[in-house]
């Protein structure tokens, strides 16, 4: 019986696990809503509810595949900014505040004087970064944060809980807003400003943290004392490692709840810092990762309820044609098909602007791969290919984040680097030549005049 490795994806909306065999092939996938409770401000996560849910998923999945052999490894990837204070027994002292929570909006003001440090951290501190949540906890729940021994990320917490050892996955450290992505050290001025708690040792993705302690997983037989727990990291970059195993220069257009454009470089041009991109640490490796984020789902879901967006996107080709001029992009947004097409064009032009910013930052030219829920629409990807001016490789239904984490675990267990993506998993979507020509003219105006798409 082949060894089985488990990957976990701790998302804002859903919690997923996959099992992969020793070849890296996915043999089981499970998904449930991310467990939430509510405090006086909004949804939060009880870390022990998360553990209970994951243990149920893992045990049930292991029983369903009928394996007589315990899992060989477990690794997790997920949200970057959420975290909790734990005591010396790794027991949580509070709940995890989600990155999208706005309770720390007032604390953002405290960090404006440190904007000059963006050249080190690669990210502008706003209410989504952990730094502002730390300061908020100091002001509103000091008894919780002052007892932290230490603070750990929610994504790392399952491995912390099961192993009894605290750590932080490397690609999660920059999401705090307080980490120097170039020399891989904390920025003391920002830690002081955030009144940061004690922080654990940083581990690269693929490093072994420890073994699973006695508990529900061990009692079920799904794991044993030999099952290793392995560091993972930030969800989008870990998902991108799946593609970069296949194509080391691949760029990723992840069209999920957020639209994230991702690339990496070992020849970073620090003089090209731009508000378009955030810079971070690749999950496992050298160089700098470049991330550009667009609020794709929020933008599309803001369309009038009367408009059937999914029906519109299910077409073989989008209705209509490119605008004849830049000014036509500023058509009023209503519920007709032309206006919706213009909205999609604007989002795709912004995405191309991010790709151009990556060029300037030193990210090597490469093929574009797309994944995520919105990438299931061939007509939308075809529009993007036409606006980007190049073919796009669509990866369909693959659970890249959880599988990417599982492969880090499998590699730690076996010493082998696996690349399970096959040609049959990839669909090539080409631009429409006539559209691409018109969009190129419009983008030239945007790029030449350094203006934002309207």
Image (cartoon, helix red, strand yellow):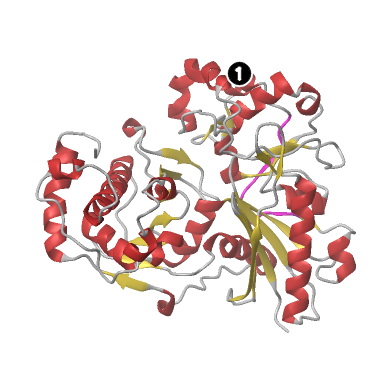
Q: Quadrant of residue 370?
A: bottom left
For the N terminus, the quadrant is bottom right
Q: Is residue 422 above or below residue 118?
A: below
Tell whether 357 sits left or right of 233. Answer: left
Q: Which residue is more in the foreground, 219 or 233?
A: 219
Q: Residue at x 25, y 51 (%)?
A: 345
For the C terminus, the quadrant is top left
Residue labelled with disc 1: 193
- Is residue 265 at least partly visible in the picture? no
Q: Is residue 213 above or below residue 67?
A: above
Q: Residue at x 33, y 68 (%)?
A: 378
Residue 199 highlighted magenta (yes or no): yes
* Residue 149 position within the rendered picture, expressed as x and y whole percent measured from the top left: 80, 33
Extreme residue in the front direction? 306
Q: Which residue is more in the foreground, 163 or 393?
A: 393
Q: Main secondary structure of the magenta part?
A: loop
Q: Quadrant of residue 22?
A: bottom right
* Residue 336 position within the rendered picture, expressed as x and y whole percent measured from the top left: 25, 53
Tell whether 289 sits left or right of 200. Answer: left
Q: Which residues are magenta?
A: 198-209
Q: Residues within 10 Å of mark 1 (few under 14, many from 20)?
A: some
Q: Which residue is more in the foreground, 330 or 1?
A: 330
Tell whether 221 sits left or right of 168. Answer: right
Determine the secondary structure under disc 1: helix
Q: Residue at x 28, y 46 (%)?
A: 334
* Residue 390 position within the rendered picture, expressed as x and y whole percent measured from the top left: 23, 61
Q: Quadrant of residue 134?
A: top right
């Amino acid at each position: 019986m082949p060894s089985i490795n488990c990957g976990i994806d701790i998302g804002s909306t859903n919690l997923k696990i996959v099992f992969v065999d020793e070849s890296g092939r996915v043999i089981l996938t499970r998904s449930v809503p991310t467990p939430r409770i509510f405090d006086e401000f909004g949804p939060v996560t009880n870390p022990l509810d998360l553990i209970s849910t994951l243990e149920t998923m893992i045990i049930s999945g292991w029983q369903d595949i009928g394996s007589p052999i315990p899992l060989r490894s477990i690794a997790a990837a997920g949200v970057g900014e959420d975290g909790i204070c734990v005591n010396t027994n790794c027991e949580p002292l509070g709940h995890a505040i989600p990155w999208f929570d706005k309770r720390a909006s007032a604390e953002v003001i405290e960090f404006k004087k440190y904007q000059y440090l963006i050249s080190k951290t690669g990210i502008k501190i706003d209410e989504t970064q952990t730094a502002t949540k730390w300061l908020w906890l100091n002001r509103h729940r000091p008894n919780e944060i002052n007892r932290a021994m230490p603070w750990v990320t929610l994504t790392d917490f399952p491995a912390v809980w099961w192993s009894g050892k605290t750590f932080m996955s490397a690609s999660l450290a920059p999401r705090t807003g307080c980490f120097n992505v170039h020399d891989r050290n904390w920025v003391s001025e920002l830690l002081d400003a955030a009144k940061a708690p004690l922080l654990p040792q940083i581990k690269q993705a693929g490093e072994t943290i420890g073994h699973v302690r006695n508990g529900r997983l061990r009692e079920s037989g799904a794991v044993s004392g030999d099952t290793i727990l392995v560091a993972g990291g930030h969800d989008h970059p870990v998902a991108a490692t799946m593609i970069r195993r296949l194509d080391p220069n691949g760029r990723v257009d992840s069209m999920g709840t957020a639209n994230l454009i991702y690339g990496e470089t070992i020849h970073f041009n620090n003089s090209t810092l731009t508000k378009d991109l955030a810079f971070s640490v690749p999950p496992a490796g050298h160089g700098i990762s470049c991330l550009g984020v667009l609020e794709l789902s929020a933008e599309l879901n803001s369309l009038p309820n009367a408009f059937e967006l999914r029906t519109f996107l299910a077409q073989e080709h989008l209705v209509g044609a490119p605008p004849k001029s830049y000014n036509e992009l500023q058509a009023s947004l209503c519920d007709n098909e032309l206006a919706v097409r213009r909205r999609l064009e604007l989002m795709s032009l912004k995405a191309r602007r991010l790709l151009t910013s990556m060029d300037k930052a030193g990210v090597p030219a490469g093929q574009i791969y797309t994944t995520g829920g919105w990438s299931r629409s061939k007509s939308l990807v075809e529009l993007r290919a036409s606006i980007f001016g190049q073919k796009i490789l669509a990866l369909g239904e693959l659970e890249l984040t959880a599988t990417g984490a599982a492969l880090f675990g499998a590699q730690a267990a076996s010493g082998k680097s696996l690349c399970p993506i096959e040609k049959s998993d990839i669909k090539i979507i080409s631009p429409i030549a006539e559209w691409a020509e018109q969009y190129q003219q419009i983008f030239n105006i945007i790029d030449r005049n350094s203006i934002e798409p309207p």
